[in-house]
Image: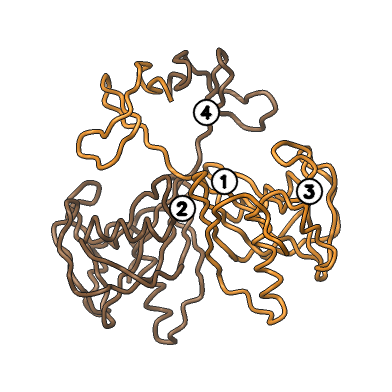
Chain colours: A orange, B brown
């Protein structure tokens, strides 16, 4: 961040008047340019005990498997965002979205909010950002080829909860993107 | 948003290449300036059946009562953010934060994430943004003088859940800031 998006002058990085931490600040028009964490929304799409995963056609982690997830957009609810991402990545329609887990990823300023969801039917195919889309039973999950640690942990937690049929809301934190040994 | 924060050139508002919705876009350096919802974190601080509320010393809603809540900062977890806001507004320390509710407020691009929490002790006093801080029993809550609809709904839901002693994670949406009749 170099220039003020309001007036175009050069920014300084300092603690603005009446604030308690450094921000990008415009001394010309006195605009404080706050930077805040972004929300990533996604879901675990279920169909008859299987889970829908997408193989990424984009970097980072090209070729690795992921749950559908992406940045929440302005103007949409977290559930609508998770459903939109599922359609974009897997051309699949999900319903009955239930809040399931929140993961803090402070080192990249992200908060993941994940739902459990039901596939409406078995219509799915790779969207522009996917190479393949496939249903996996628990013993078929490609644990060593999951794209992101946060989604691997979501799946681990999900299969831990599933035998009891209870999915209490879970909150966790991710400190690195290295996959956990499963 | 008028100028590119990267190179200082004037921005255009258009659908960037390979995108599906209009964004602020710099044709000079090709930076897309994404705008995403912000997370507001807060809590319901409990002490022996009473709830800690703060009377606002700032606009908007000067003089109205609020639960401690504010924007999540980069680098902090949602629970840490809720605890920080509680300290800033009420000089109170909360512990045992349990995720309780998420509210979408799409028309202002905010997502509220609220915890239940226990006050560590009865030390509290107004922070810089508060006129007063006080513990309220259920029948003392100033329902007509709550600052924000989202926090009023959080409290309504909380007192609805409390008799059963179960607080399943709740998800809701707020469409206006008018207070509900209680």
Relative side of B51 to A179, left or right? left
Q: CA distance from mark 4 to mark 2?
A: 20 Å
Q: Helix, strand, or loop for circle 3?
A: helix
* Disc 4 + disc 2, Cβ < 8 Å: no
* Disc 4 + disc 1, Cβ < 8 Å: no
In the rendered image, residue A5, in percent from the top left (x then y), is placed at 41, 23
Q: Helix, strand, or loop for circle 4?
A: strand
In the rendered image, residue B173, in percent from the top left (x then y), is placed at 48, 58
Q: CA distance from mark 4 to mark 3?
A: 26 Å
Q: CA distance from mark 3 to mark 1?
A: 17 Å
* Disc 2 + disc 1, Cβ < 8 Å: yes
Q: CA distance from mark 2 to mark 1?
A: 10 Å
* Disc 2 + disc 3, Cβ < 8 Å: no
Q: Which residue is mark 3?
A: A90
First in sequence, mark 4 or 2: give its number.
4
For disc 4, the neighbor class at 10 Å (few under 14, some 14 to 19, many from 20) is: some
Same chain? Circles 3 and 1: yes
For disc 2, the neighbor class at 10 Å (few under 14, some 14 to 19, many from 20) is: many
Q: Which residue is mark 1?
A: A72
Please name which of the two marks, 4 or 2, marks the residue nearer to the observer. Answer: 4
In the rendered image, residue B182, in percent from the top left (x then y), is placed at 32, 71
In the rendered image, residue A84, in percent from the top left (x then y), is placed at 67, 48
Relative side of B135 to A59, left or right? left
Q: Which mark is residue B111?
A: 2
Q: Which residue is mark 4?
A: B33
Q: Helix, strand, or loop for circle 2?
A: strand
């Amino acid at each position: 961040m170099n220039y003020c998006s309001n007036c175009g002058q050069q920014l300084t990085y300092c603690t603005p008047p009446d604030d308690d931490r450094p921000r990008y600040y415009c001394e010309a028009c006195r605009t404080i340019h706050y930077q805040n964490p972004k929300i990533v929304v996604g879901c675990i799409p279920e169909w008859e005990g299987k889970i829908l995963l997408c193989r990424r056609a984009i970097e980072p982690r090209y070729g690795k498997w992921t749950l559908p997830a992406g940045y929440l957009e302005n103007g949409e609810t977290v559930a609508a965002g998770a459903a939109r991402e599922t359609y974009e990545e897997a051309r699949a329609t999900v319903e009955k979205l239930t809040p399931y887990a929140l993961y803090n990823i402070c080192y990249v300023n992200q908060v993941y909010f994940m739902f459990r969801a039901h596939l409406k039917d078995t219509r799915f195919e790779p969207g522009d950002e996917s190479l393949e889309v496939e249903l996996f039973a628990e013993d078929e999950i490609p644990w060593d080829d999951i794209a992101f640690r946060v989604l691997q942990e979501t799946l681990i937690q999900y299969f831990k909860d599933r035998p009891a049929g209870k999915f209490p809301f879970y909150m966790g934190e991710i400190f690195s993107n290295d996959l956990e040994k499963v």
